Amino acid sequence: RIGVSRAFPIASTYPAVALVFGLVFLHERVDAAVVVGLLLVLGGVILVSRPHFDLEAERGAFMTWGIPFALLAAFSWGAATVLLGPGIEGLDVIMVASIRTPALSLMLWGIVALRGTFPRLLTLSRTEWLTLIVGGLVAWGLGSFFFLRAVSLIGPTRTAILTSTAPLFALPMNVVFLKEKVNLVILIGTVLAVAGIALVS
């Protein structure tokens, strides 16, 4: 493992992967504003996210396999986003989401079965079950619908860039509910990301 402070910035490069794939395979028209916007968003997201990570706890992290896995995550997310472009053309977004989500569930349940971790489900409390179910409905239900709709309307590249700004939306909730303090680094990161969003949009 390499720790979240290293894995997150690496995995967050997936919009760049989507950009390259979109140019090569879909011949998307991408102007300089989108490229600059991508760089600003990536820089801003990394600055906003990095203060949340425990750097001291991760200094001794084992890095042999962590970096390849983080790069594979970025590659997978970027490639999947681009593949969705032509794949959902002319199709109903809800229908597409209804296929993707069960397919993902089957794969994950298969991994759980291979690892033999089914008994751990029995140890979950009602609150934990409720949290997981509601979180799943919001993330993989609403989130999947909005994501697919965005791909169909503005294309894979812009969707990948804009959806990478998720930490910006978590920031206000952290301030309100967790009483987290906002420092200069977070403010700079937010400004960069917002500027990037403006360019991409």
Image (cartoon, rainbow, N blue to C red):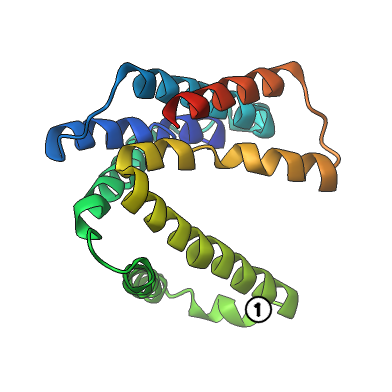
- The reply, left or right, for residue 3 in relation to residue 153 is right
Vertical arrangement, residue 84 with respect to residue 103, above or below: above
Q: Is residue 170 visible?
A: yes
**Residue, disc 1:** 123
Badge 1 element? helix
Which residue is more in the foreground, 83 or 178?
A: 83
Residue drawn at point x = 37 percent, y = 24 percent? 34
- The reply, left or right, for residue 88 in relation to residue 134 is left
Q: Position of residue 199 (x, y in %)?
A: 46, 23
Q: Is residue 2 visible?
A: no
Q: Position of residue 92 (x, y in %)?
A: 32, 69
Write down the quadrant of residue 156 in the picture. Answer: top left
The quadrant in which the C terminus is found is top left
> In this view, which residue lies farthest toward the right?
179
- The reply, left or right, for residue 156 in relation to residue 140 is left
Q: Position of residue 131 (x, y in %)?
A: 68, 69
Which residue is more in the foreground, 24 or 47?
A: 24
Residue drawn at point x = 26 percent, y = 54 percent? 84
Q: Position of residue 136 (x, y in %)?
A: 55, 67
Task: Name the kind of residue labelled 1 in the image.
Answer: Thr
Residue drawn at point x = 65 percent, y = 76 percent? 129
Give the crowd class for mark 1: few <14, some 14-19, many >=20 residues within 10 Å. Answer: few
Which residue is more in the foreground, 43 or 33?
A: 33
Vertical arrangement, residue 132 with respect to residue 53, above or below: below
